[in-house]
Amino acid sequence: MTNTLSRAAHTASPLLPVLAGRWSPRGFRPTALVDEATLTTVLEAARWAPSASNMQPTRFIVARRGSDSFAKIHETLMGFNKAGANAASVPIVNVATLPIDVTRENPWARYDLGQAVAHLTIQAQHEGLHTHQLGGSDGTALGVLGDVSLLSPELLERESAPRTRKPLVELLLVND
């Protein structure tokens, strides 16, 4: 049995269980595989995310553990991201296609990519998987929750720290 943490959010208003249960673990099970059907479902959720003018600028580089692409992605990561993504089943590089044509750029491409990654993240949670966004690399680590006792003391401290969020009132710039 693995030693895992429950990290469900304590929310001020009721959320869908999949949203309240979503969190970003730093430890994945290094031997777990994500089957093709589940991976396809997670990517399908991203494909159906809203996009401005239906331009669908989202692209993904999907690498499975053990592949050359996995090694190449892992080489580019630094610090905590490198340690966490090493055990992930599937690191995903998130890419926004910016050009509309040779003279114009899609001003909403990055926003749309964020929407797609959010949909991917929630679908993954629904499928019993976890994701961790990799800051500085526009990536997402996807995998099965691992045994927290295998984390370094520094990562374990971060993993077990209380989850916090700013109060909703601090997020509202105008609330007429």
Image (cartoon, rainbow, N blue to C red):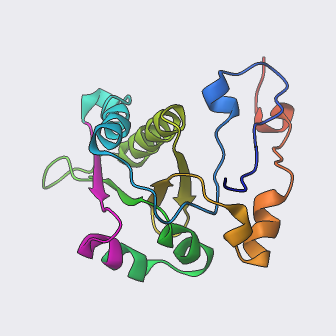
Quarter of the rendering containing residue 167: top right
Instruction: Specify whether residue 127 is painted magenta.
Output: no
* Whole-percent x, y for residue 82 in the image: 53, 76
| Apparent side of residue 131 relative to residue 65 in the rendered image (left or right) | right
The stretch of residues the image draws in magenta is: 56-71
Residue at image location 50% in from the left, 41% down from the top: 121
Left or right of 75 in this view: 3: right
Which residue appears farthest toward the front when viewing the image?
Answer: 1
Please give the count of numbered marks on the rendered protein.
Answer: 0
Picture residue at 33% right of the left edge, 28% below the top:
48
Q: Position of residue 122 (x, y in %)?
A: 52, 35
Q: In the rendered view, tell whether residue 86 sits above or below residue 15.
A: below
In this view, 155 is above or below 19: below
Query: Dividing the picture into quarters, in which one does residue 165 lie?
Result: top right
> Considering the image in quadrants, where does the C terminus appear?
top right
As rendered, which of 23 and 170 lies closer to the eye? 23
Q: Which of 158 and 168 is in front in this view?
A: 158
Res 147 quadrant in image: bottom right
Q: Is residue 73 above or below residue 128?
A: below
The image shows residue 140 at horizontal and vertical percentages of: 47, 57
Q: Is residue 88 left or right of residue 67?
A: right
Residue under the point 46% across and 68% down: 137
Q: Magenta span has 57?
A: yes
Position in image of residue 88 (x %, y %): 48, 62
Which residue is painted at 38% across and 38% down in the image? 42
Residue sticking out furthest to the left:
102
